[in-house]
Amino acid sequence: MKKIIPLFIFGIISGAAFGATDWWNRDTICTIDETRCYNAQTPGIDFSFETGWDVSGVCRGKKYICPNALTAGGYDPVAMERAAIANGTGIIADFDTSVYVANNNCYGARKSKNGGAMVSVNGEYVRVWCNGILSNPTEELQYGEITTGAQPTCTALAADNFAAVLNGKCYGKYYNPDNYAIDCNGEVPVLILLNGANYNPTGRGITQSDANSTFGSMVTTSAGQRGIHFNR
């Protein structure tokens, strides 16, 4: 019994030294660090035990990148580590991976400006066309459609009574041909109010100089007629 007492006392002292908790159940140095790469409330993140570990970041959580934003394409979002996203690995430069696309639960919307009315395609900003204007759109976006090919010309749009003007957050506005004609000064649409007149386009718009010349001629003619008929 004398040999047991010191061991018993050592057990009490050891327990006091390590606190009242079950010290033998404490985490060891081999336990995986569960520090998160992203806030637990962040949407579109893979926090799963099987695939969510960010090896290079040494933390849990990979961001789902939308397939449209990936050079490899595909149909499903891909969970990527933070370092790869920061380096742009496999990501198309026209897409912003900080923007969350809620309906797909992933990140990667086209870079935009002018409130979303223009987006980046091959490093240049193109117009977002209102639905129904493009005969063969390449991609549907929140505010309309885009084409990654040749953009519709002013003349082609005018043939269908559309002008390339901002219409909300997309481009393309329809004008009733009974009331308006659309001419093109290069790629700039020129809207002509008919007021019942028949309009035959000349291939160019009416400039301010043309208008000044026409009205100047009208004033001169009117002044001459007044002199003839009213200054007797």
Image: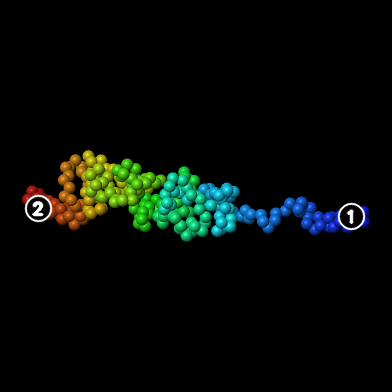
* Disc 2 element: helix
Pick the front one: 215 or 14: 14
Please name the amino acid that badge 2 sits on. Answer: Gly
As drawn, the residue found furthest toward the top would be 178
Q: Is residue 90 visible?
A: yes
The picture places residue 92, in percent across and down from the top left corner, at 41, 55
The residue tagged 1 is 4
Which coloring applies here?
A: rainbow
Q: Residues within 10 Å of mark 1 (few under 14, many from 20)?
A: few
**Residue beneath the point at 78% across and 57% down:** 18
Residue at the extreme right: 2
The number of numbered badges drawn on the structure is: 2
Q: Which residue is at 81% across, 55% downward?
A: 15
Residue 193 falls in image quadrant: top left
Q: Position of residue 32 (x, y in %)?
A: 64, 54
Residue 224 marker: 2
Going by the image, does 51 lie left or right of 206?
A: right
Foreground of the two, 90 or 224: 90
Residue kind at label 1, given as amino acid type: Ile
Mark found first going from the N terminus, 2 or 1? 1
Q: Residue furthest bottom?
A: 87
Q: At 42% from the left edge and 51% from the top edge, which residue is drawn?
A: 72
User: Would residue 231 be visible to someone looking at this image?
Assistant: no
Horizontally, residue 178 falls left or right of residue 167, namely left
User: Is 192 or 100 nearer to us in this picture?
Assistant: 100
Residue at mark 2 to residue at mark 1: CA–CA distance: 134 Å
Tell me the SS state at disc 1.
helix
Residue visible at 48% across and 54% down in the picture: 98
Dividing the picture into quadrants, the one containing residue 113 is bottom left
Of 70 and 118, the residue lying toward us? 70
